[in-house]
Amino acid sequence: MKRKTFYHISLSLPYIALIISGALTYFANGFDPFASSDPPGMLMGSLFFFSIAAVIWGPLYTWMVVVLLLWGRGKSAVAVRRMYMLSPLLLACSMGLPALLVGIPDSGMFLLWGILQMNNLDYVMPAVFRDYYHYPEQSFSIGMAWAFMAALCVVIGYAFVGMAVLIERAIQRRNLFKPEDGVKSLESRSRLT
């Protein structure tokens, strides 16, 4: 297998983990962890959280995978690997969309406040909006939700990237990667000269 193909296939690791965690959650409690009198353990609680949180991260991750696959066409394996290593940060940034959709009025205030703050125009806010002094506290909750979801994406995403790197190193030690097309043509040119 080519190295670039491996990176594309490794993008399916979160989907495989979702299928496994969903199956284990279903067989353990049938997606109702509060049905039994005992609270779920750390492992089952984490699996349940991962399965339910897929409602939020699943569509965004799928969008990111599609963009990475389209972007990776014609790129070198090094460029694809670099983008794969940065993908948890990309997903963490996109987690702001669900956070902003939770409370649209507060989100608008949060964005407007941020834009005015960056442009040193925050003195305009009390003149334009009544009860301005209540908005930063309400808007702060949107920012904290975004930061929480982004932190989870970074931690969990780099766990998956770490697994892919470990698999890549095991494949590389066994020399199972085929040379890329550009590398093959360079080798053939060096033999001719």
Image (spheres, grey):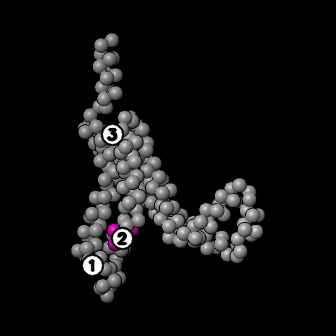
Residue toward you, 26 or 130: 130
**Which element is circle 3 on?**
helix
Image coordinates of residue 48 in percent, x first then y, are 34, 72
Mark 1 vs 3: CB contact within 8 A: no
**Circle on res. 52:** 2
Q: Which residues are magenta?
A: 48-53
Mark 2 vs 3: CB contact within 8 A: no
Mark toward the start of the polypeptide (2 vs 1): 1
Q: From the image, give the main secondary structure of the stretch colored magenta.
A: helix
Mark 3 Cα within 10 Å, few/some/many (few <14, many 20+)? Answer: many
> Residue placed at 32% from the left, 80% from the top?
33
Q: Is residue 80 above or below residue 114?
A: above
Q: Which amino acid type corresponds to the residue marked 2 in the rendered image? A: Ile
> Residue placed at 37% from the left, 43% from the top?
70
Mark toward the start of the polypeptide (1 vs 3): 3
Q: Can you tell which quarter of the image residue 153 is in?
A: bottom left
Image coordinates of residue 131 in percent, x first then y, are 70, 76
Label 2 – label 1 distance at C-alpha: 13 Å
The residue mark sitting in front, 2 or 1, is 2
Q: Is residue 167 visible?
A: no
Tag 3 residue = 4
**Circle on res. 29:** 1
